[in-house]
Image (cartoon, grey):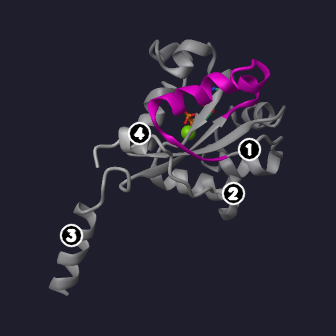
């Protein structure tokens, strides 16, 4: 038992920075697609150093969006949210990296663009909460749920970016 615990601890601390990574679910919403912002948004995550694991272009059903936003089902804006989100194609993605869930949320900015700092995606590129162009998971648990909802396991690509050794210390 004690040996197991020591081994488990050792395996946690012996992970390199590149290995100790998590995944997040990011999606360009229909307004982001219609406004031609897909490339700009992907560029920010690429330039930061995060690794693209999955990406597709799809027109989501209301059914899928009701599952995606199940936590908000009781809110007054829910019907409008589902209608807006199913009004056109979206670009769901999975990005991987150290602290990517939290950092991804910082990169997005606050939910309501009027409160999003300049320099964030929402702070720079949109104005109203009901047209805030991008989704990002708010926890590792939510990310795993959302990734499973939008992607098949075989769509998550295992690869090692050539730049990795220059992004992480070890
Ligand atoms: P976030 O997208 O930052 O995780 P959330 O999960 O609280 O925010 O809400 C999901 C989306 O619902 C949000 O991106 C935009 C919409 N939304 C949230 N609050 C709203 C409001 N008060 N009025 C209209 N739409 C709202
Ligand atoms: Mg949310």
- Where's residue 129, x and y in %? 62, 22
Question: From mark 1 to mark 3, how far is it between C-alphas?
Answer: 38 Å
What numbered label is drawn on residue 155?
2
- Where's residue 77, x and y in %? 69, 32
Check contact, mark 2 vs mark 1: CB within 8 A. Answer: yes
Q: Quadrant of the N terminus?
A: bottom left
Q: Earlier in the sequence, mark 2 or mark 1?
A: 1
Against 93, is 2 above or below? below
Mark 4 lies on residue: 102
Question: Which label sits in the foreground, 4 or 3?
Answer: 3
Against 39, is 104 above or below? below
Question: From mark 4 to mark 2, how far is it between C-alphas?
Answer: 23 Å
Quarter where residue 31 is shown:
top right
The magenta span reads: 28-54
Helix, strand or loop status at disc 1: loop
Mark 1 lies on residue: 56
In the picture, measured across the screen, residue 142 lies left or right of residue 22, that is right
- Where's residue 14, x and y in %? 24, 63
What numbered label is drawn on residue 10?
3
- Where's residue 106, x and y in %? 43, 29
Q: Earlier in the sequence, mark 2 or mark 3?
A: 3
Question: From mark 2 to mark 3, how far is it between C-alphas?
Answer: 32 Å
Helix, strand or loop status at disc 3: helix
Q: Earlier in the sequence, mark 4 or mark 2?
A: 4
At label 4, counting other C-alpha atoms closer than 10 Å, the crowd grade (few under 14, some 14-19, many 20 or more) is: some
Check contact, mark 2 vs mark 3: CB within 8 A. Answer: no
Q: Is mark 1 within 8 Å of ligand 1?
A: no
In the picture, measured across the screen, residue 168 lies left or right of residue 79, that is left
Q: Earlier in the sequence, mark 4 or mark 3?
A: 3
Question: From mark 2 to mark 1, how far is it between C-alphas?
Answer: 9 Å
**Could one spot residue 167 in this view of the protein?**
no
């Amino acid at each position: 038992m004690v040996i197991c615990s020591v081994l488990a601890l050792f395996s946690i601390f012996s992970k390199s920075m590149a290995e100790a990574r998590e995944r997040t679910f990011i999606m360009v919403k229909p307004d982001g697609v219609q406004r031609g912002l897909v490339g700009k948004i992907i560029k920010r995550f690429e330039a930061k150093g995060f690794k693209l694991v999955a990406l597709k272009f799809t027109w989501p059903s209301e059914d899928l969006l009701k599952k995606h936003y199940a936590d908000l089902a009781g809110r007054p804006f829910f019907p409008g949210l589902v209608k807006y989100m199913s009004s056109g194609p979206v670009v769901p993605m999975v990005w991987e990296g150290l602290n990517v869930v939290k950092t991804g949320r910082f990169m997005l900015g606050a939910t309501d663009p009027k409160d999003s700092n300049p320099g964030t995606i929402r702070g720079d590129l949109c104005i109203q909460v009901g047209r805030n162009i991008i989704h990002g998971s708010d926890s590792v648990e939510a990310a795993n749920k959302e990734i499973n909802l939008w992607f098949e396991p075989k769509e998550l690509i295992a690869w090692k970016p050539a730049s990795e050794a220059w992004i992480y210390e070890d």
